[in-house]
Amino acid sequence: MDTFSPEKRSWIMAQVKSAGNKSTEENLLAVLREHKLTGWRRSYPIFGKPDFAFTKKRVAVFVDGCFWHGHPQKCRVPESNREYWLEKISRNVARGKLVTRTL
């Protein structure tokens, strides 16, 4: 059981700033350049703050780590507050599937 209200937890999570995906983003950047894919912008100011946006094709690309999307072999769920994290990751996975379908 989470010790904070949903509003407080949301505020706490909003304060966490991205810092851990730099190498993953750089790898994707190298792949885009290697395959001469053009038309993308980084840090484009649209809802959700995608890592890459292909504005003419209306495609947003989010580069997130294995933990946040529940990778079967790489996601190590913390032992403390395990139920909360399992719920959180399952919602992320469901949301990712929904977003992929709507594109």
Image (tube, rainbow, N blue to C red):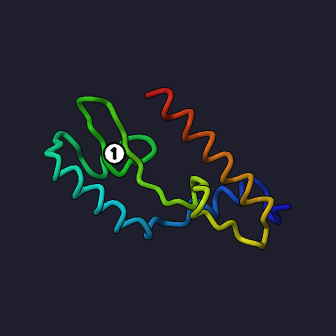
User: In the picture provided, is 57 more to the left or to the right than 93?
Assistant: left
Quarter occupied by the C terminus:
top left
- Residue 88 % position (x, y): 69, 53
Residue plotted at (57% across, 57% down): 68
- Residue 98 % position (x, y): 56, 33
Image: 7 above or below 18: above
User: In the picture provided, is 16 more to the left or to the right than 39?
Assistant: right
Image: 71 above or below 46: below
Quarter occupied by the N terminus:
bottom right
| Quadrant of residue 78 within the rendered picture | bottom right
SS class, disc 1: loop
Work out whether residue 52 or residue 77 is closer to the camera in this orientation and state it.
Answer: 77
- Residue 53 % position (x, y): 30, 42
Image: 41 above or below 57: below
Q: What residue type is labelled 1?
A: Pro
Which residue in the structure is indicated by mark 1?
45
User: In this view, which residue lies farthest toward the left?
Assistant: 36
Residue plotted at (29% across, 61% down): 27
Work out whether residue 38 or residue 34 is closer to the camera in this orientation and state it.
Answer: 34
Image: 48 above or below 86: above
User: In this view, which residue lies farthest toward the top?
Assistant: 102
| Quadrant of residue 36 within the rendered picture | top left
| Quadrant of residue 97 within the rendered picture | top right
Mark 1 closeness class: few <14, some 14–19, many ≥20 residues within 10 Å = few
User: In this view, which residue lies farthest toward the right?
Assistant: 1
Work out whether residue 76 or residue 55 is closer to the camera in this orientation and state it.
Answer: 76
User: In the picture provided, is 10 more to the left or to the right than 87?
Assistant: left
- Residue 31 % position (x, y): 24, 53
Q: How many marks?
A: 1
